[in-house]
Image (cartoon, rainbow, N blue to C red):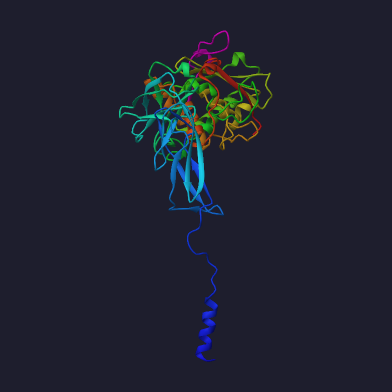
Amino acid sequence: MPLAVLSGLWLGACGGSDSPSGPVPVVSVQVTSPYPALLVGDNVQLTATTLGARGAVLTGRAIAWTSRDPAVATVSTSGFVTAVSPGMATVEATSEGKRGERMLTIVAPASPVSAAGQLFMIDALQPGPLTAAFRIGDSPPKSVSVGTDGRFSLTSVAPGDPVDLLIDGPAGAYLPSLLRFPRAAVPATALRILLAPRRWTIATGTYASSTIDISPNQAFTPPCTTTGDTNCDGYYPKAWVSGIKVWDDATLPAPLAFDHARSAAPISASDSAAFWAIVDRMEADIGHELFRPVTASDLVIDADGWSAGAVLVRLDASLAAGRGFTNWRWDGRGVVHSAVMRAGSAAALGGSSLVTHELLHAIGLKHSCAWPTVMGGYGCPSAAGLTRQDVGYAHLAIHLARIQRTTNAYRNLYEAMQGERVALLGLGPVSLTLAEALGLPRESGRGQDGAH
């Protein structure tokens, strides 16, 4: 074929393009604000996004800002808003003749609310920079930097009720902590807050050197929804709203005795041997001596069948053969000081899952279906013994309880759960109040199905 023909064919294949010429026109403008309300005197940077016909974001387009209500709020040429007086203000952004708007509520200052306190942390676990912030209503947070000594003090005149105090920082060593108060009940005394770590490395026992991610929200979530059932509770019980309540590890191993005089049936030497073999396995897993054998005659047992500073084990004919039930008591410092474990039969004392489950109750922990656990039973299976998460969360609670007692920082894991829910998970805070928690009995227990 002649060269001229080939050239003509090539040119014909490349010609006739229908690609649009010039920039894609703006068809709409979206205006957003991080806060729907501002306090008089506050500022906020608005954002205008220009969009094409198919919703694609268009960049580099000129935008003109105006306020329809400059007596209420003014806006700069860059979209920076200043709240001037109470009322409603509409701010507009215009690009290529297309306009978007955002309505803002400007509110007057309220009576000041103030809080001060000190943060406490785990030794050698550095937090990085932290802030303390009031989050009240729809207004922007009022925040201050926490000092190197862990102290903070802040005041806000934003209107609203309740008042949230959030302790947070860059994603580092510690979880955020959230404290919620009725506006009229923000404490005048200094708050003492013990921060909870995001991760925990198990130091001793079967799972030594294992690291787990800590989720107080999972640990506090009960595996059931039975209204009015005090046993329907999380691995970390709701009574911990006023501080961790576990056995003081400095007093372990706790004396443990079979209460033959109050048992519904004999407990034989072989029953005892099977029971203590399970305790040995439990202690090896957790890496700490928990219980030591004594006889009931070594203890002072009161008329109610309790012995201060000890754990009693007895058989109870009112329970099914494969079931157990444990009650435990704590003092005003949150120290568990006594427990009574009951089993439905002597054979149950040889059940690894049941005995481990009930003795973990005696330490002060409850139930979970959030991870593979020996503390299941509410619609999820119970493992035969302690799992990695069981040990890690127990170690953390015992360690923080020690710091809690020495620093008097009884706001800790419960506040970390609230902080995780609000700041990390985008959930609402749990509604249980400190006043409600203080009304909880200082004794807890639950029947356990031992058929595992």
Percent coordinates x, y for residue 137 in the rendering? 49, 27
- Residue lying farthest to the bottom in this orientation: 2
Residue 336 lies within the magenta run: no
Residue 347 relative to residue 254: left or right: right
Q: Which residues are magenta?
A: 289-309
Image quarter hosting the N terminus: bottom right
In the rendered image, the vertical position of residue 380 relative to residue 134, given as above or below = below
Q: Residue at x 44, y 42 (%)?
A: 65
Q: Residue at x 50, y 58 (%)?
A: 24
Image quarter hosting the C terminus: top right
Residue nearest the observer in this picture, 8 or 215: 8
Residue nearest the observer in this picture, 389 or 153: 153
Residue 295 lies within the magenta run: yes
- Residue lying farthest to the left in this orientation: 148
Residue nearest the observer in this picture, 175 or 33: 33
Percent coordinates x, y for residue 229 in the rendering? 63, 22
Percent coordinates x, y for residue 275 in the rendering? 56, 27
Decide if residue 340 is in sight here. no
In the rendered image, the vertical position of residue 2 relative to residue 10, given as above or below = below
- Residue lying farthest to the top in this orientation: 303
Decide if residue 148 is in sight here. yes
Residue nearest the observer in this picture, 341 or 45: 45
Tell how many labels.
0
Percent coordinates x, y for residue 277 in the rendering? 54, 31
In which image quadrant can residue 270 be found?
top right
